[in-house]
Image (cartoon, rainbow, N blue to C red):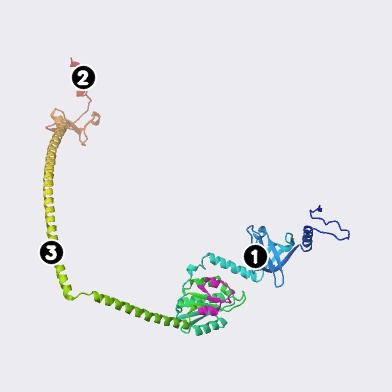
Amino acid sequence: MALRDAQGRLAPRAPADDGERTWSVAGLARALADALQARFGAVLVRGELSGFTRASSGHCYFTLRDDTAQLRCVMFRQRAMQVDFVLADGLQVEVRAVVSLYEPRGDLQLNVEAVRRTGQGALLEQFLRLKEKLRAEGLFDQEHKRPLPTYPGVVGIVTSTQAAALRDVLVTLRRRSPQVHVVLYPASVQGPAAAGELARALGAAAARAEVDVLLLVRGGGALEDLWAFNDEQLARAIRASPVPVISGVGHETDFTIADFAADLRAPTPTAAAELCAPALVDLRQALTGLDTARVAALERLLAREQQRLDRLQLRLPTPARSLHRAVLQLRDLGARLLATHAIALQRRRQALDARATRLGAAAAKEYARRTGDLDALQWRFEAGAARARERRFATLDALARRLRLLNPAATLERGYCLAWRSDGKLLEQVDMLGSGATLVLATSRSAARLELATVDAVPHPLATLLHTGVEDSP
């Protein structure tokens, strides 16, 4: 039975008789792992990422290597989530890791705790970030690519006047496609200002509108040398150009952002020159083939039309027979026309007579109905007018009676009179008079002015009359 120490590790077996110690495989592996951790602890290691994979659990597995050696590495999910850039093959990185031994396989490995970019790996990370950004915007989508002209007449070249790629393109075009004209739009292809110059050259070509296709070319080099072609401004200028763009940057294994943004990517500048225009030899062969096909098609057409003409000539009748047939046909058509006209005329007459009969009956019926309605309306009008006249006369009589009752002249005719003061106010109370006042009395027939020396109140005549009438009543 295996024994374990206080840390739970397998303890070595008791020494054999010969004095040597015997280890189990697991015990020795753990002892080695402990020794490595105790000897090295956390270390910083610089190298290139290779064989990078990310498991579904989120753990990352890769190899860190240089020119002469390599080490297996593992980075667990919690550590990998803290990395702020994309891990990919080819990145130059510096890792902080713990040296350990993977016991199930007995492999030496680095348990990575942190990663940071170094050297070219930072450029590659920047390249990948820009590529992903522009791809997400749809800048590289195939449906946005412009079709290349089949037979361009003028080819524009955007590159440096000192570039070897320019000589390769010119030699290739002179050898394969001497029928095309070339326009050079010079720009730097390396250095901090190169990307802006390349974008401006593309804009100048678009503004001048003198070429059918543009070649954006440069020879091979390191990633830093080709970095001007990984510029976002240049990529957008390529997509904004109304002229189709073919990129030929570096060697076949070199890829830049300009390659993805261009309408067609050529592996080399020479290949770009070959792809932009067909070879003159091929054009001549195609032209010869088209001419041969044209002659053959024309000969077949002439033969087919000659055969059709012969068949039509056999079917063509003689003039006399055609004239006789036409006369007979004309007579038949004339007789049919007369018969059809007579039948149609008879039908129209019958229909007209039937409509006239129905119209007369309907008119008589409508006249009788309208006459009865008119008589009824006239009777109702006269009766209503008589009732209204009677109501108006009765109203007028009642108003006349009321008017006669309210007429002041009728009151005066019954023996009453009206009294006014000299200032024109109607006398309503005795106290409105004073000593020496002037009073005007009016009856129904005359009026008189009275000068009053004194004013004495006397009993009201109507009150006396009413009192007397009450006492004298039975």
Residue 377 position in % (x across, y down): 14, 40
Which residue carries the number 1 mark?
52
Label 2: few (<14), some (14–19) or many (≥20) C-alpha neighbours in 10 Å: few
Question: For numbered disc 2, what is the local secondary structure?
Answer: helix
The reply to whether discs 3 and 1 touch (Cβ–Cβ < 8 Å) is no
In the displayed structure, does residue 32 sit left or right of residue 47? right
CA neighbours of label 1 inside 10 A, class few (<14), some (14 to 19), many (20+): some
- Three-letter code, disc 2: His
Quarter of the view holding residue 75:
bottom right
| The quarter of the displayed image where residue 464 is located | top left
Query: Which residue is at the front of the view, 158 or 259?
Result: 259
Q: Residue at x 16, y 70 (%)?
A: 326
Question: How far apart in space, not on screen, are marks 3 and 1 (Cα)?
Answer: 99 Å
Q: Position of residue 57 (x, y in %)?
A: 64, 57
**Image quadrant occupied by the C terminus:** top left
Residue type pointed to by label 3: Ala
Q: Secondary structure at mark 3?
A: helix
Q: Which mark is residue 467?
A: 2
Q: Which residue is mark 3?
A: 335
Residue depicted at x 54% and y 66%: 135
Badge 1 vs badge 2, beta-carbon distance below 8 Å: no
Q: As shown in the figure, which amino acid type bears the numbered disc 1? A: Phe
The outermost residue toward the front is 314
